[in-house]
């Protein structure tokens, strides 16, 4: 693979620094140390800690603390895609993403008071088991299959992105890096279970934040000061916080972040099996709620660091954009380029930063592998195993094998992602096909007591088909150049080196006939995919439930979120109240039935 930092034919003043940079022993030592520590943690929990049951393997014996659990959730959510993508987003499209402060707050509140009470009350190993007890096994299996496929497409991308960054600044090939990273992750996840995942995630998250903070400080020093970064960003039109355009066709607005991104984060955090699995690993529900608060605060801090890093990158390259000069071939290579520019002369720091990128990938992959193993076992394998004294021990071993198999498949798919090229964007958008409808299913279950099995199945299928058509059609038009999001302007006027004439020539926009303009629905911003998918499932599910017939008498109050139990028949309230009455009280048996 051609190194974008040493592209031939360009005369850079910076090329001397970047071209001569080679990972030193300290950089490799820091990177290797992280991988070794991760494996040792897995070995410790696998061989010196009890792992002979599903409760131990998936829930850590329900003795985990809220802080390491929260750190694990943050680490698994902050993937290399976020670390590379958010600074590039700010560099080319402005700081509207900063509204994630409000998004994270809303997500934490909804999770704590709508979804978490139901999950913690039922104590289900798999969140999709809730859909079975609330509706039917068919709904559960549909959700499990979609979730598994979604993660199988997502994990290879998570691994591939930091591998690209690492390969850019070393002589190592992606074909060597990706198997090594995946094998390390498979080992400590399969051996150590949730305890290993949580503690390695905590360590890896600390490394990630440390690398980001160090690069942030160096970037500010290279520009001059925080005030200078802010001034240049303001003059360049990057400080965008309240774009109140209500149009769903605008790429990113205040409303897109508040509504669209909140729905996306609810799908990734409130109902995600891996997140719920971690919340259930703490002893009490109040500990789980404390974990949601810590998670929200941590996510806000990391996101803001990434956003300000994007502003620093703009301040540094506003008049000499490395993407325009072809120093890099993709916008998501901007951050590695920037890191090597400001930190390449400091031994160990580039290694620390890249270790942070790989750490984020490891955290996301380990969380996904642990979650998928539990989902596949609980939903597809467990019903086929006969009850017995050894079932729990057998289950833990089976899940370890599942982790090994799924991890191996992910390694293979990494090479497929590399070859597909433009399909990289399609794979990311595919999550929009499944996340919204999955969120809609859980909303119907917890917030709509009158929803029934037939209505939910009908709504779920309608939502999935609609999102497949919407997202698939949009990506098809994007590949053919009919949909393009324009970035904010940058310049090459300040480049301290002569440019080839071909670099200053504008790239023509693909020409198309007026009748080839995409349908207006395909022009909807990707920010709204999750909320659209969820809305279709909810609306269609409610209407279909009324058509098939509503039966509130059969609804268990424990399956409904507390704020919606008032809509259940009074008999249900009496039943709940009498269940909680002390046995010493004289209660007529017939009243408790």
Image (cartoon, rainbow, N blue to C red):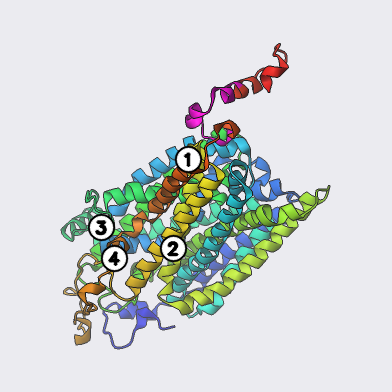
**Pick the front one: 160 or 204:** 160
Earlier along the polypeptide chain: callout 2 or callout 4? 2
Residue at disc 4, secondary structure: loop
Magenta span includes 570: yes
> Mark 1 sits on what residue?
546
Mark nearer the viewer, 2 or 3: 2
- Is residue 532 shown to the viewer in this render? yes
Mark nearer the viewer, 4 or 3: 4
Tell me the tag on residue 250: 3
Query: Which residue corresponds to the image point at 65% horizontal and 41% vertical from the top-left?
Result: 62
**Pick the front one: 474 or 239:** 474
Specify the principal SS of the magenta part: helix
Magenta extent: 558-574
How many C-alpha atoms fall within 10 Å of the one at disc 1: few (<14), some, or many (≥20)?
some
User: In the image, 513: left or right of 142?
Assistant: left
In 3D space, how far apart are the residues under numbered discs 2 and 3 (Cα atoms)? 21 Å
Query: Which residue corresponds to the image point at 26% horizontal and 84% vertical from the top-left?
Result: 11
> Mark 4 sits on what residue?
519
Mark nearer the viewer, 1 or 3: 1
**Pick the front one: 360 or 114:** 114
In this view, the residue farthest toward the right is 389
Earlier along the polypeptide chain: callout 4 or callout 3? 3
In 3D space, how far apart are the residues under numbered discs 1 and 3 (Cα atoms)? 36 Å
Residue at disc 2, secondary structure: helix
Earlier along the polypeptide chain: callout 2 or callout 1? 2
Q: Position of residue 515 (x, y in %)?
A: 23, 73
Residues under numbered marks 2 and 3 in contact, where contact means CB atoms less than 8 Å apart: no
**Vertical relation: 204 (above or below) 588:** below
Q: Position of residue 8 (x, y in %)?
A: 33, 87
> Mark 2 sits on what residue?
468
């Amino acid at each position: 693979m051609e190194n974008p930092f040493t592209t031939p034919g360009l005369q850079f003043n910076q090329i001397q620094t970047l071209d001569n940079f080679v990972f030193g022993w300290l950089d490799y030592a820091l990177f290797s140390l992280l991988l070794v520590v991760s494996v040792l943690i897995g070995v410790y929990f696998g061989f010196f800690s009890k792992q002979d049951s599903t409760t131990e393997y998936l829930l850590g014996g329900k003795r985990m603390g809220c802080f390491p659990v929260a750190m694990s959730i943050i680490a698994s959510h902050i993937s290399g895609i976020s670390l590379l993508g958010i600074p590039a987003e700010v560099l080319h499209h402005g700081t509207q993403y900063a509204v994630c402060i409000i998004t994270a707050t809303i997500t934490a509140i909804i999770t704590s008071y709508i979804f978490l009470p139901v999950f913690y009350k039922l104590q289900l190993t798999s969140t999709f088991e809730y859909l079975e007890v609330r509706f039917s096994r068919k709904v559960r299996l549909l959700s499990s299959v979609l979730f598994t496929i979604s993660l199988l497409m997502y994990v290879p991308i998570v691994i591939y992105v930091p591998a690209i960054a690492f390969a850019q600044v070393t002589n190592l090939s992606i074909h060597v890096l990706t198997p090594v990273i995946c094998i390390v992750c498979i080992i400590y996840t399969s051996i150590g279970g949730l305890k290993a995942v949580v503690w390695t995630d905590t360590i890896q998250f600390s490394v990630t934040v440390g690398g980001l903070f160090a690069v942030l400080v160096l970037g500010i020093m290279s520009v001059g000061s925080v005030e200078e970064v802010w001034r240049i960003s303001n003059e360049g039109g990057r400080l965008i916080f309240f774009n109140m355009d209500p149009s769903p066709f605008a790429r990113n607005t205040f409303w897109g972040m508040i509504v669209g991104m909140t729905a996306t984060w609810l799908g990734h955090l409130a109902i995600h099996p891996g997140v719920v699995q971690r919340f259930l690993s703490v002893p009490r529900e109040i500990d789980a709620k404390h974990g949601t608060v810590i998670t929200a605060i941590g996510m806000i801090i990391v996101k803001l660091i990434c956003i300000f890093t994007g502003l620093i990158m703009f301040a540094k390259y506003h008049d000499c954009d490395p993407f325009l000069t072809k120093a890099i071939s993709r916008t998501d290579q901007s951050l590695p380029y920037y890191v090597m520019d400001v930190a390449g002369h400091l031994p160990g720091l580039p290694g620390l930063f890249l270790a942070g990128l790989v750490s984020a990938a490891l955290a996301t992959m380990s969380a996904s592998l642990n979650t998928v193993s539990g989902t596949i076992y609980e939903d597809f394998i467990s019903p086929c195993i006969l009850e017995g004294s050894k079932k729990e021990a057998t289950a833990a071993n089976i899940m370890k094998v599942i982790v090994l198999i799924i991890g191996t498949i992910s390694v293979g798919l990494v090479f497929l992602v590399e070859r597909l090229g433009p399909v990289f964007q399609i794979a990311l958008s595919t999550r929009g096909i499944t996340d919204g409808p999955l969120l809609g299913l859980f909303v119907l279950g917890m917030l709509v007591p009158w929803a029934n099995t037939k209505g939910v199945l009908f709504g779920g299928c309608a939502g999935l088909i609609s999102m497949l058509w919407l997202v698939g059609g949009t990506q098809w038009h994007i590949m053919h150049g009919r949909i393009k999001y324009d970035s904010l302007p940058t310049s090459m006027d300040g480049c301290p080196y002569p440019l080839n004439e071909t670099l200053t020539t504008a790239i023509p926009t693909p020409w198309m006939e007026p009748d080839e303009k995409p349908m207006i629905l395909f022009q909807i911003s990707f920010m709204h995919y999750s909320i659209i998918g969820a809305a279709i499932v909810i609306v269609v599910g409610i209407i279909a439930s009324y058509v098939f017939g509503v039966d509130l008498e059969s609804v268990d109050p424990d399956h409904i979120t507390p704020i919606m139990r008032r809509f259940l028949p009074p008999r249900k309230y009496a039943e709940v109240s009498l269940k909680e009455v002390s046995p010493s009280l004289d209660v007529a048996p017939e009243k408790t039935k």
